[in-house]
């Protein structure tokens, strides 16, 4: 559904930084003039990804998975110099990505993108598809939200891609 910008804020109560919203329906703010075709395409792919993820996971995918995957699909590159705060957990990323403060939310989105890219690097799109259907089937994630993200980039300042497979480390065993 398309809205004027003011109308979009009124209807969705979205944070000021939101450029689109999926709540079961795709809702997009468009001004008197359309954004450039390229931006619009990214926006549509991003919001459509939310719809597909929502469907596959039957609404059970966490926000970090939604936003990370939607950004991957729209073609957003990860920041190789991304600095992940030490001790940050998936629950922390989840909270960060939903903040009303645009800078904090941006950080949450960047980290979510990085986490999903890491999952893709390790298991490919099939592994993610499987994760989504497991969530859809009601299975709880085995690695809890308290699993810490390894602050590899912060320590080494090296591109994430050169350190695959060690970027996330659960503090506790499976359970
Ligand atoms: Zn989104």
Image (spheres, rainbow, N blue to C red):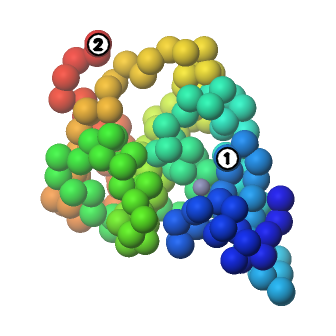
Residue shown at 37% from the left, 19% from the top: 142
Is there a contact, CB below 8 Å, between mark 2 and mark 1?
no
Q: Determine whether, in the image, residue 15 is placed left or right of residue 106.
A: right
Quadrant containing ligand 1: bottom right
Q: Is residue 118 visible to us here?
A: yes
**Of 166 and 90, which appears nearest the observer?**
90
As drawn, the residue found furthest toward the bottom would be 33
List x then y, in percent, for residue 151. 21, 51
Where 80 falls versus 38 (above or below)?
above
Q: Residues within 10 Å of mark 1 (few under 14, many from 20)?
A: few
Location of residue 49 in the rendering, given as x and y in whole percent from the top left corner: 70, 47
**Kind of element beneath mark 2:** loop
- Image location (x, y in percent) of residue 115: 42, 46
Q: Is 92 drawn above or below residue 43 in the view shown?
A: above
Mark identifier at residue 23: 1
The residue at the point 46 percent across, 45 percent down is: 64
Name the residue carrying label 2.
175
């Amino acid at each position: 559904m398309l809205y004027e910008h003011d109308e979009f804020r009124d209807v969705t109560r979205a944070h000021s930084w939101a450029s689109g919203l999926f709540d079961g329906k795709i809702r997009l703010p468009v001004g008197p003039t359309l954004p450039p075709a390229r931006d619009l395409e990214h926006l549509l792919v991003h919001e459509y990804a939310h719809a597909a993820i929502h469907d596959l996971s039957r609404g059970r995918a966490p926000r970090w998975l939604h936003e990370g995957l939607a950004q991957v699909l729209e073609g957003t590159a990860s920041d190789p110099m991304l600095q992940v705060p030490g001790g940050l957990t998936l629950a922390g990323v989840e909270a960060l990505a939903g903040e009303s403060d645009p800078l904090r939310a941006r950080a949450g989105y960047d980290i979510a993108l990085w986490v999903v890219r890491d999952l893709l690097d390790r298991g490919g799109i099939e592994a993610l598809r499987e994760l989504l259907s497991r969530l859809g089937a009601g299975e709880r994630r085995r690695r809890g939200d308290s699993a810490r993200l390894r602050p590899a980039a912060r320590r080494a300042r090296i591109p994430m891609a050169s350190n695959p497979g060690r970027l996330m480390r659960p503090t506790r065993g499976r359970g």
